[in-house]
Image (cartoon, helix red, strand yellow):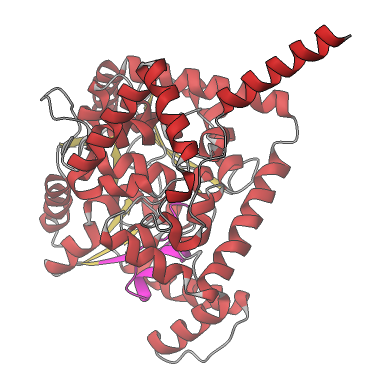
Amino acid sequence: MNNHFREQAIDALADPQLRDNFRGAMDFLRAKRQSAFTDTEALKQLRALGHKIKANTLARLPDLLEQLEQNCLQNGIQVHWAETPEQACEVIHNIISAQNGQLAVKGKSMVSEEVGLNHYLEKRGIESLESDMGEYIVQLANETPSHIIMPAIHKSKEQIAHLFEDKIEGVDYTDNVDELIGTGRQILREKFSQADVGISGVNFAVAETGTLCLVENEGNGRMCTTVPSTHIAITGIEKVVATLDDIPPLLSLLTRSATGQNISTYFNMISSPRKTGEKDGPQSVHLVLLDNGRSRMYQDENLQQTLRCIRCGACMNHCPVYSRIGGHAYGTVYPGPIGQVVMPQIDGLDKQGEMTEGCSLNGACGEVCPVEIPLPNLIRKLREQKSAKPDGHALTPGAGSQRKPKEAFAWSLWQTLYGQPWLYRFVTKMATRLRHASPRAIGGWTRYRTAPKPAPKSLHELMSQRAEANQTDGASK
């Protein structure tokens, strides 16, 4: 692990409050998901269907994106393409500046976190206020989300109460959850009416109709997309689906995997700006489609499976590492198993490759993924790429950047040893005979564990002895 990840993880493990917050939250979310999928055969069939839909979408991704753009334009939605985070932020800033906007209210969007939109706008004098309650809390604390579905999951109600008391003028301490929510809503209601622009993410973009689908529970997403005169939606290019028929199974998988709900409280379908005669809705709608490395992922036959993700967070909820250290320890926008696959491909293996080592490869993330992304295999693939001998063929940036000569030599030796049976038997026999000379300290392994020591006899020797004993017993009978 790199020093940053290591230090953050150590700090997190030393924080009993943080560990207690995550332990309780993860247990709650796992139980909710389990109660939502009581029929294992139905779950198996639904996951297979979700896999098929996303796989078919990826197979036609370039064509579907063009179809989405064409139908959005026909509906009156202006489409913008952004290859980099800087381009996405610039597009959104230009839209807001064109109408002299000073305040944007933003619904929950991990892609906007990915591009660093809030900081970009604030540096240019535009207030960008988070309206999702969890996002509002972490923004108030000047933090980043620690979970892609529940951004403030790392905080207890008492910590939030102290935060509101310190940061919001005229608010006294109370750990009554209803009163805390009421305080946040009162502030946000006023901001919705004052905002020049509403910004949201997109859960699914339907190519055949040009419809933007948004899943949420608080109603803030609907406020962001209908109250301000301009609505800007930002999403990654992988969120496109072919038809409206693809939505029900994916929505069922998303909400039940994320929060154990059969369906979210709100499901918004945005197909156009306000039409003549309609009394509400934005006068203009913009869609920003972000690449940021996704086209590169798409070109890799194995790693393109990353783009099947529907951002439910189930892999995090079931990851034993994430459950103990939380999201901030990763130091990236996307934490946990999906973050260990996404971030090295976006930022490069030279910058984020070592976070793939923060995984025990227990397989839980792959078992719960609603669209059957083989996350352990992808993490293992990225580990291989970061340590492989550079050959110029790997598409992931930074491939081979963390290759260590000693480690490479050790694996080369291992390959030679296991490739020649006579050499393997000789070495294992010598290891058993010289077991008392084994080192007592082996780097980080012996920091918390005893040093492994070869057995007195190899498995091959033990099996040979057993066979001889059986022959002797058979002859004596």
Q: How many labels does the image show?
A: 0
Q: Is residue 149 above or below residue 277?
A: below
The reply to whether residue 232 is in sight is: no
The reply to whether residue 209 is in sight is: yes
* Residue at the spot 26% in from the left edge and 33% down from the top edge: 76
How far from the left and from the top, in percent, is residue 294?
24, 32
* Residue at the spot 70% in from the left edge and 36% down from the top edge: 37
26 part of magenta stretch: no
The answer to which quarter of the image holds residue 132 is bottom left
143 part of magenta stretch: yes
Relative placement, left or right, of 22 versus 61 is right
Q: In the depicted view, which residue is nearer to us: 394 or 207?
A: 394
Q: What stretch is highlighted in magenta?
A: 128-149
* Residue at the spot 65% in from the left edge and 40% down from the top edge: 262
Q: What is the quadrant of the C terminus in the image?
A: top right
How far from the left and from the top, in percent, is residue 214?
44, 42
* Residue at the spot 69% in from the left edge and 41% down from the top edge: 36
Q: In this view, does 290 lie above or below 140?
A: above
Q: Is residue 369 above or below residue 447?
A: above
Most distant residue in the right direction: 477
